Every structure is written in structure tokens, then in C-alpha cells.
Amino acid sequence: MPKLNPLKDGEWVYLKMSGYLFECCDCGLTHKLDFIVASEADGHILNGVEIALRAYRVDKRKPAKKKKKP
């Protein structure tokens, strides 16, 4: 497994378009994310662009809600 770089709450990060690995602070699992940038007008994929992302914990006191089993 590749080394993951820890981010601070609200820190900006430029994403790899495919194979971006994200480790969830609530569940502790590593998630693989893929991205595209598409034109809203016609849906064509736009190349040569960068995506930046930042994330915040909404409520730091509570873990994410878990789905109830049916």
C-alpha cells in the first residue's frame, strides 16, 4: 500500500485524476477515488485541468452515522 500523506482539517490538496487514495478518519478504511472534469453543457471530458479539494469534519464529537441494517 502506498504511503498516505496526512492532511490537516481544511487543507487544500491537488488530486490525481485516478487512483487517488483517501483514508477515512471515521472508519479507518482507505478509499480509492477517480475523478473527471466534464463540460456541463455537453458532458465531454475536459483535459489539462486540475482539481483541488479540501474537506472539513462537520461535527468532530460524533463519528459518521452508520446505516441501519434492514
Image (cartoon, rainbow, N blue to C red):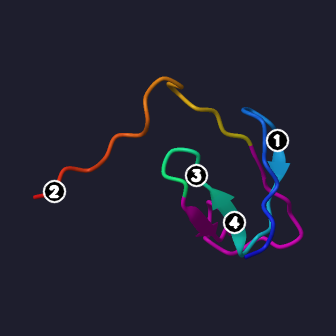
Q: Are marks 3 and 4 in contact (CB under 8 Å)?
A: no
Residue marked by disc 4 = 21
- For label 1, the residue is 12
Between the C-alphas of marks 3 and 1, the distance is 16 Å
Q: Residue at 63%, 67% (x, y): give it.
A: 33
Q: Is residue 65 left or right of residue 11?
A: left
Magenta extent:
29-53
| Of callouts 3 and 1, the N-terminal one | 1
| The quarter of the displayed image where residue 14 is located | bottom right
Do tag 1 and tag 2 residues touch (Cβ < 8 Å)? no
Is residue 37 at all visible to an observer of this figure?
no
Does 8 sit left or right of 29 as displayed? Answer: right
- Counting from the top left corner in percent of width and height, residue 59 is at 50, 24
- Viewport quadrant of the N terminus: bottom right
Choose the circle earlier in sequence order: 4 or 1.
1
Tell me the amino acid under the disc marked 2. Lys
Q: What separation in Å lies between label 3 and label 4 (alpha carbons)?
A: 10 Å
Q: From the viewer's side, name the closer residue of 12 and 9.
A: 9
**In terms of depth relative to the viewer, which is nearer, 21 or 26?**
26
